[in-house]
Amino acid sequence: MSNKLLLGRYEIIEKIGEGGMAVVYKAKDRLLNRYVAIKILRPEFTKDEQFIENFRKESQAAAGLSHPNIVNVYDVGKEGNIHFIIMELIDGKPLSKIIEEKGRLDYKEAINIVRQVASALSLAHKNQIIHRDVKPHNILITSSGTAKLADFGIARTISKATLAEGDEKIMGSVHYFSPEQARGAYVDERSDIYSLGIVLYEMLTGKVPFDGDNPISIALMHINNKMPSVSESVSGIPPQLEKVIEKATDKYQSNRYKSADEMIEDLNNIDFISKIVGDSIFEEVGEGKKADHKESKKDESLADDDKDKKKSANKTKIFIIAAVAVIVVAGIIGLGALMGWFGGDSEEIEVPDFRGMTLEEATEEAEKFGLKIEEGVGRYSDQEEGKIISQNPEKGNKVSEGRVITVYVSLGKNVNEEEEEKPNGGLVPNIVDMDYKQAKEYLESFGFELGMVVKVKSTKPENIVLTQSIKAGSQAEEGTRIDVEISDGKGKETKAVPMLIGLDVDAAKAEISKSGFSVGRVSYDQDPGYGKNVVIGQQYKAGDELEAGSTIDIVVNKVKENSESSDTN
């Protein structure tokens, strides 16, 4: 691709990066005499017209965003089969690389980066643009420390692709998926906030909270598993910052920050307090016992004068901290109450059953348990109008005090002139890739029922839904039974066959092994269009799914004088 000229204007200079969806090149804009970055879609994604259309629309929308923390998109274009985005060239490196190099970031640095990204998301969300793929790979840090969010153009279109099993190029995004993205459910601004909370966790600990052998298992962790505590891995982190992560990554959208601006406000408050009291108060919480043990041994060898000096210095330090604490305690208490910092490890509350109640009755009942009620979108049903028909979280779930419970109120029967007796037709949700027991509850929350469950052979984890009898997004009457096929977890693993044609025979053999297969029969033929010992044929087409460990035969080009017909290597 180097030295190619796009649109007679953009001179490709060198490749500077690549991902699962595209390759990025440094280029020179001859017209404006400036350097730019060009992101070119990989060929395999240019065959899907719907993908390309989404790519074009989202890229054009992103081009309208002007913000210091968003990578500028200058143009979206096409030349032949090449689809590309012209972007601002950033002098820096992706956040993922910085985390890899440092192991983990200082909490103040992490707050600074998250605040900038949240500011970028705030503008995008106000323009009705959801990023859908917030992760360290898409956050670029300039040499001056400015964070810039990239890839608005392809974020919308990769939501389903990132869950494609066996594709190592694009599986990374699932580590940052919100539970609703993993379920294929409704995505909004709070989905981006969840992903940003995961990024914050990774910056502080140097690792993602959920990891596994395949994308599906990781997605299920986002849906089912409790978010691990940062303080279990790292000491010296303000407890308030943990609260921010907990709120941003709540399993339920209604319990997260309602906007990126809310998250920024909490981060600003933490930054303000840490500047007043310093880091030592947080470090001493995590390291106090260890430090006391070290000092007790050391003190035994100190002279009495040194001990007195040390005690005096410690008293001075304690006095200063106490004095500062007295000055800010009122503000901290008030602020802490607002942010819920002082909840501690409060006893979890079992969610009561609000179904059948009115909104007012549910609100009154929730207050008795220290819970809050939020009304979701009303639904037509056979239940009396004004009565709650479902809730999230459901009854029996354990939650902490102050948790918001979203309730859905009946709008009564949807009676029209043509079909007076038919109940409202509702949208069927997507339950594929969910555990079938969770799928049952999820269907019921939409007014449907789980029908026949058939277990079939599959490589996916046991009991994961593979297919549903009524397609997601279709209209169906309330109470309709939806049959499913679920995985038995015993299927043999399959992998994608690599492209071997054009590779040197040794490189092809290495690629076969690397891809999880074995080298089969190597035969020879002549093709003047290829060089000596270059692969000119392969048994299976590139991209075909084949059982892991299978053998793949190849055909290698030979010079004219060779008479060998095969090699059983």
Image (tube, helix red, strand yellow):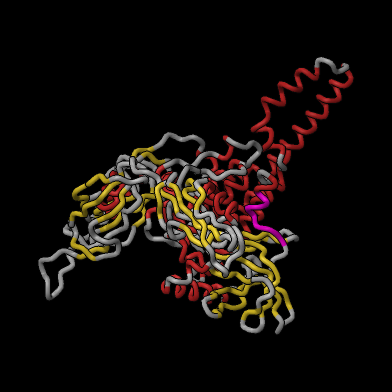
Q: Quadrant of the N terminus?
A: bottom right
473 to 111, vertically: above or below = below
Q: Residue at x 27, y 44 (%)?
A: 353
Q: Nearer the viewer, residue 404 or 59?
A: 59
**Where residue 21 appears, x then y in whole percent?**
53, 63
Q: Residue at x 70, y 43 (%)?
A: 327
Q: Residue at x 61, y 55 (%)?
A: 114
Q: Residue furthest top?
A: 300
The residue segment tinted magenta is 92-99
**Where residue 27 appears, x then y in whole percent?**
69, 73
Q: Nearer the viewer, residue 553 or 55?
A: 553
Q: Quadrant of residue 529?
A: bottom right
Residue 87 in sight from this viewpoint: yes
**Where residue 30 appears, x then y in whole percent?**
71, 82
Q: Residue furthest left?
A: 421
Q: Residue at x 30, y 49 (%)?
A: 465
Does residue 357 appear left or right of residue 541 in this picture? Answer: left
Q: Is residue 13 magenta?
A: no
Q: Quadrant of residue 384?
A: bottom left
520 to 123, vertically: above or below = above
Magenta span: helix, strand or loop, mainly? helix
Q: Nearer the viewer, residue 116 or 195?
A: 195
Q: Quadrant of residue 77?
A: bottom right
Q: Is residue 93 magenta?
A: yes
Residue 265 in sight from this viewpoint: no
**Where residue 150 appears, x then y in whole percent?**
59, 65
